Image (cartoon, grey):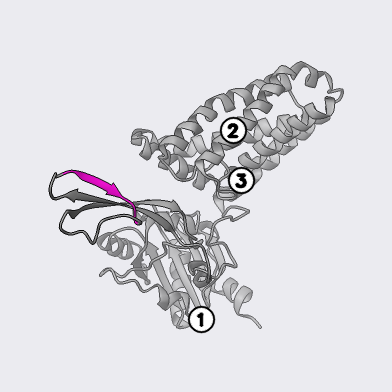
Amino acid sequence: MKIVKHIARILFGIIFIFSGFVKGIDPLGSTYKFTDYFNALGMEWLIWAAFPLGILLAFGEFAIGIAFLFNWWMRLFSWLGLLFMAFFTPLTLWIAIKNPVTDCGCFGDALVISNWETFYKNLVIIVIAIVAVVNRDWFAKQVKTKVPAILSILSFIVYFGIVFYSYNHLPVFDFRPYKTGTNIPEAMSTPEGAPQEVYENIFYYKNKNTGEVKKFTEQNYPWKDTLNWEYDNLESKLIQEGYEPPIHDFRIETPDGENIIDFFIYDENYVFMLVAYDLSKTSTKSQDEINTLANWAMEQDLSFICLTSSVYEESMAFAEANNAPYEFFNCDEVTLKTIIRSNPGLVVLKDGNVVGKWHYNDIPTPEEFQKKFMTE
């Protein structure tokens, strides 16, 4: 029985540590997820709190997980773990039923599970939390040294260091489909033989004699009996989801709406893409470094462009105000936020491969770029 108790405690701790860590190293990703929730719930007035809530939630999970893993202050943290699950379990049930967002974000981008899978997972975890609360005094009595406290505090220090670095640079681990090493054309393609979407069609036909509208399946709808029936409506229901490529919504559009993505993702030379999802929110602290790199790239006959969701007039105003020498093209805001967690951020492609990504705090100089990528 002792072993079962400790296994339950450690399992709870590992799950919470993983969840808190993968969200903690991607604070902007957590911010975007909270923003999605607030928009879906009609709580736009609370969007200002998305960033601090993302930080607090991730650390709360990590702290509870560490306490469980090292058996530290279990009289307190067992209750905190149960209260956490008592709040989120019914919330995830509501999300599974109403489906306001397709991905709850409980494990960030590291592990995407459905809303119903999230709820079932929480049912198991809340049982473990109840076991921990019931045995909190027993757990506390097993601690004979200060080792759990020391390990927990050291873990918190390391955690905050990693979170701080990830926010001011880029996440130390990139779980998104545009991570370095990804071949974009391959990630946009559908493999041969991949599952296709399957729909069930319900046909509604009106009886010409009685005026009654009846529904039929594909097997028995009276499409040939034009004397007695006339088509009224069609209802299609998705019964099997098909394969969706990791990258499925990436477009690079001119001001006229033409998609010219192939021009860049099949370029055999280096392609510099400055990603600025919203120019009104874009940091300009590294604009001089960006302009220097852009001028050098274009002197080498390399493409240097900016992808933004801002309208053409805003792009031209930004270019004039900041002496930006590069062209601006449009892309979906959500896609840009997914590509890189920095506004702006720099992504470099070659032969369709993502060869490098930089936060605006780390824009390389032409010399640094040449040394890393162009020296033989």
Which of the pair 363/356 is nearer the observer?
356
Which residue is disc 3 drawn over?
Answer: 22
Instruction: List x then y, in percent, for residue 240.
Output: 46, 54
Residue type highlighted by circle 1? Asn
Report, in whole angstroms, how far the alpha carbon at label 2 lies from the one at label 1. Answer: 48 Å
The boundaries of the magenta stretch are 212-218
Mark nearer the viewer, 3 or 1: 3
Q: Which numbered circle lies on residue 269?
A: 1
Q: For this rendering, which residue is in front, 175 or 131?
A: 131
Up-down relation of residue 229 to residue 151 (above or below): below
- Give the residue type at disc 3: Val
Residue drawn at point x = 54 percent, y = 73 percent: 366
Relative to 255, is 113 above or below?
above
Q: Amino acid at mark 2?
A: Asn
Tell me the element at label 1: loop
Q: Is residue 165 magenta?
A: no
Q: Choose the circle earlier in sequence order: 3 or 2.
A: 3
